[in-house]
Amino acid sequence: MWPEAPATVVRLTGVGKTFGDRIAVEGLDFRLARGDILGLVGANGGGKTTTLRMLAGLVTPDSGDGELLGAPLGPHARPLPTSARRRLGYMAQATSLYGELTVGENLRFHAEARGLGSDAATAAALRFGLGPRLADAAATLSGGWARRAHFAAAVLHGPELLLLDEPTAGLDIVTRRELWGWIADLAAAGTAIIVSTHDLAEVERLPRLLFYDQGRVHGPLTPAALRHRAGTASVEDAVAALAARP
Amino acid sequence: MSRIHAPILALARAETLRLLRSRVTLSLLVTVPVLQLLLFGLAIDPTGARLPVAIAGAASPGHDAAREALAKEPGLRLVADGPAGSARVAVATGTAILGIELGATAAEPPQIIVDGSNPALTAAAEARLAARYWQAVAGQSILGAAAEPPRVVRLGNPEARADWPFLAGLIGVTVMIGMVMLGSLSLAREREGGQWETLRTLPFGPATIIAGKLLPWTLLGSLQGTLVLAAAVTLFGVPAPPATIALLALLPLFAATHLLIGFAIAARARTQLAALQGAVAFYLPAMLLSGFLYPAETLPAWAARLGALFPLTPMVAAARGALLQGRPAISVLAAGLPMLVVALVAAAAALHALHRERG
């Protein structure tokens, strides 16, 4: 799909970020190759969103170094270049569709903003089942439809790296499973995916996790390793137990 | 406490705490009145104007007496003294606001040429000149050799309609307020709504975002200005000489300049309320110091210099020049130069702030 793309999509070594005196993230070390999925789990305020924002080029790390889609990443690196952003998909926590535009118009905007034709928007609408709501203003969509449309907008260009910040928050079980299915499909097609989530039942199926504890990052580790570390039977219990430790 | 009063008091308490903890709201409550006090108290003095006046006519003992009398007039400032016909030219080209063409002979009454673009400013001076003339008549000076009243010629606004200068200036004021508000609030709204974050991850930079937003809104601002102009002409009889086309050609630049100012405000404002505060803090002094409400001649030098920094100042002058003073198109278009400078500075400020936005 991307013949010239390197196998390593993201590599971080000791990356961290502080806001004033508060350590938002420290000790971020991992490597992600095409087709990998990495889950970010932990209590709210642990640093998951800051990690994703650093990777999306929205926040500059103030320690460590790394590489993202071939571009350097670190305190002294220049902003993420256009060539890297062209291969990046980012879905923030807040639905960022234009409320006044219809779903179709929003998808078309995202396609054209990435230099693609409206065909890409149509294809994404079909792929993610948005056909019935294409003509609806985004502001009128329910939470589930809005997340679905937001997801479609973030991936319609076939990104090499997809950053998802709590994509399933507030969704019903059917839509949640549908969305996790799409995430798995994208990874199978070669997209590297980093997903922050509180959907811990689904996280059991992910190959690798980073556990966030008030800015400190543990991992990557497998769900089994996380369960073992906490001495619990599920990742959900492990996160609850580890997050409650003083 | 009754069941009715308790929720009212609870809401009032919560609202008070919110107000006290919102620095933006508090500074809005303080900044705007302070700005108004400073401007109205220190800068605006409509009675203190010293209007530039030109006098013309052949040298003669009688005319010299008239010149001496004019020099002593406290509300006037002699800026040109030349041969017959030159006072009219001085008013037509904007060098003077009032011109006095002395008669060729002692029997001929003087002609007073008035810049019609601002009757509110010139009315008092006209009255003073008339009074001086009739004093001279009584004193049998050269001015008073004829018993006929001086003939007043108002260039561009023969009926001295006070609404015309305001309507001409309103074209710029309407576009300025609309575009500064749109520019600042829309970016701030996108930031609060979450769209801004996604925009910043797309494969283009802030310059592209600004250019993309600028295009439709510039058209909108130009259309808005054109509609105000059309209404002024059709409903209120404001003249539309050929230089009106030059005025219309200025509108896109004027609108874009204010959008860029709005973007520069929004690039620093974290919330819509802060953006609104910034927009008000910009357009309030612009309206007061641009010559729209109070002529530049009534402002102290520092205030006039400050006023010259606002793009509204050349726009008001261009609109009045084109519609009421018969200025040529090239002189109207020249108002675009200071606007262009402000536009470039605002664009640089907005881009600088947006590039620095990464935390």
Image (tube, coloured by chain):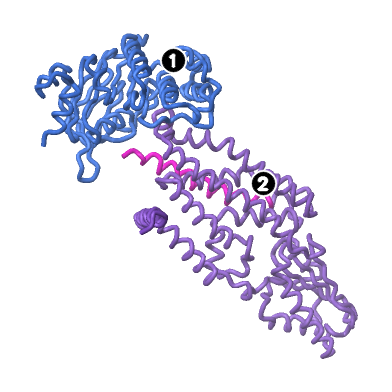
Chain colours: A blue, B purple
Q: Which dot marks residue B164?
A: none
Would you call the spot at circle 1 few (<14 residues within 10 Å), some (14-19), or many (20 or more)? some
Would you place residue B184 above or below residue B38 in this image? above
Check the residue under mark 1 and report the chain it is in. A
Residue behind mark 1: A128
SS at badge 2: helix
Q: CA distance from mark 1 to mark 2?
A: 45 Å
- Give the residue type that dot 1 points to: Phe
Residue A23, position as x, y percentages in the image: 20, 39
Please indicate whether residue A61 sits to the left or right of residue B257 in the image: left
Decide whether residue A40 is among the magenta residues: no
Please indicate whether residue A69 sits to the left or right of residue B343 in the image: left
Q: Nearer the viewer, residue B333 or B176?
A: B176
Residue behind mark 2: B225
Secondary structure character of the magenta stretch overall? helix
Please indicate whether residue A51 sits to the left or right of residue B129 in the image: left
The answer, for residue B162, to whether it is visible in the render is yes
Q: Quadrant of the C terminus of chain A?
A: top left
Would you place residue A62 above or below residue B346 in this image? above
Check the residue under mark 2 and report the chain it is in. B
Q: Which residues are magenta?
A: B332-359
Residue B194, position as x, y percentages in the image: 41, 35
The answer, for residue B23, to whether it is visible in the render is no
- Give the residue type that dot 2 points to: Gly
